[in-house]
Image: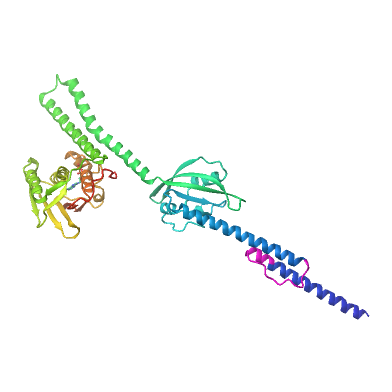
Amino acid sequence: MIALLSLLLLAILVFFTRVLWVQNRRLQQLQEAVQSRQAFLADTTGDLPAWPGLTAEVNQLITENLQVNQQSTDQLAQLEVTLGNLREAVLIVDETNYIHLANRALRDIFPASRGLVNLRLELIIRHAGFLEYVRATRAGAAQPRQEFELVDGTVSTWIEVSGAPIPSPDGRSQWALFVIHDMTRQRKLELLRRDFVANASHELRTPLSIIKGYVETLVDGHATMAPEAREKFLRTIQRHSDRLNAIIADLLTLSRLESATPGLEFAPVDLPAFLQEIVEETARRPAAAGHQVILQAGDQVGTIQADGEKLTQVLTNLLDNALKYTPAGSQIITAVRALEAGGEVEIAVRDNGPGIPAADLPHIFERFYRVEKGRAREKGGTGLGLSIVKHIVQMHGGRVWAESELGQGTTVLVRLPRSQSGPASGQLKLL
Ligand code: ADP
């Protein structure tokens, strides 16, 4: 009897252990289905009566959840297509700073990171102030617009950001939407302008303070001053007034070239004859007395469409430099040739003077850039000659560059198209 009871108890224990094991397994499967958002397909026949109802409810929830997610993905995709062609950059981030939308304009601002979507914002923009702005925007506590300078190594990107909080597609959390303007070009131009004004003021102040000092000395002491000293003072004043005059003339030239109506007048220019006149005129100048000034015109150079007056300024500036920066006895060759490809002509002004160090070469077309500051000023240079040259050449649709070897000489090359396809543009970038 006891043995029979024990057997029965054992059978009941085995039965319940099995039921528990099966239920536990079902619960695990249910948990996996919810975690992976996939329908719960376990066969529940023979299970507890509550299972079929629970399974149906869970599967319904999973399906609804998938539909909501799909809807929000579709909405974002739709939004991305709509915003794709906007010039303004648009960014949407969720409550944990994951990027859900980044249109093409935004990807243009951050070209290094091609795919932005699904990345954390912190990986793209590591700027504490910007990330704080994002947080404040979600909290509805940010200023409507703010500007940031993002520095990556030596490269700065300036952005102006306007943000607004938006509800997430499922309505359960707060996201944020940003419209971003790339301000880099404007800021760089402003910096260039600021530098330019500072440099120009400095350049003008130097001769002016020298003139002022000498004039004051003359006013106070002219009655007792020896005539030679007075003469020396007056000559110094004259030299520095000439310098002031030259700087102001070059500044006015640059400002005219940059104006909306630079007034270029294109006409056929017979290049060999034109260059011959300029080279002969240069050779006759007193400054060229000890120099050899030569023209070498290649075959088939012929005529180009150009503004003769502006082109004269280009050649005069280049020949002036060659005379200024080479010692007496140097050779200055102006060579012109027709380039077979592209219908262009190339004018080269070559000297065998001291040359320009490689480190300075890329900068000599910048305003007020001088290789040897003191010496260039002493020679009467304004530091603007080559930037005027570059402006004029670009307005003709050409390009200019310099090649040089220390101790061997310098060649400045100007390449110009033979004809002008469209009206000259006055809006050129600051050099
Ligand atoms: P600047 O009015 O001072 O001559 P530019 O803009 O014409 O200014 O030239 C910039 C600088 O480039 C000059 O100050 C000079 O140092 C250098 N440079 C230009 N041409 C030559 C040359 N032919 N040989 C040596 N240095 C030159």
Characterize the magenta stretch by its predominant secondary structure: loop
Question: Could you say where residue 52 lies in the image, as x and y percent from the top left?
Answer: 74, 67
Residue at x 16% of width, y 54% of height = 346
Describe residue 301's horizontal placement relative to residue 175 as left or right: left
> What is the quadrant of the C terminus in the image?
top left
The part of the image, by quadrant, that contains residue 54 is bottom right
Describe residue 45's horizontal placement relative to residue 4 as left or right: left
For the view shown, which residue lies furthest in the right direction? 1
Q: Is residue 158 above or below residue 73?
A: above
Q: Does 324 appear in magenta?
A: no
Q: How many marks?
A: 0
Residue at x 21% of width, y 34% of height = 248
Applied colour scheme: rainbow
Q: Is residue 220 above or below residue 298?
A: above
Front residue of 285/20: it is 20
Question: Could you say where residue 70 lies in the image, as x and y percent from the top left?
Answer: 57, 59
For the view shown, which residue lies furthest in the top direction? 223
Observer able to see residue 351 = no
Question: Could you say where residue 208 lies in the image, as x and y percent from the top left?
Answer: 23, 30
> What is the quadrant of the N terminus in the image?
bottom right
Q: Is residue 317 above or below residue 201?
A: below
Describe residue 249's horizontal placement relative to residue 226 as left or right: right
Front residue of 77/312: it is 77
Ligand 1: quadrant of the figure: top left
Segment colored magenta = 30-49
Observer able to see residue 61 = yes
Residue at x 44% of width, y 58% of height = 114
Q: Does 44 appear in magenta?
A: yes
The part of the image, by quadrant, that contains residue 214 is top left
Question: Could you say where residue 321 lies in the image, as x and y percent from the top left?
Answer: 16, 45
Front residue of 241/88: it is 88
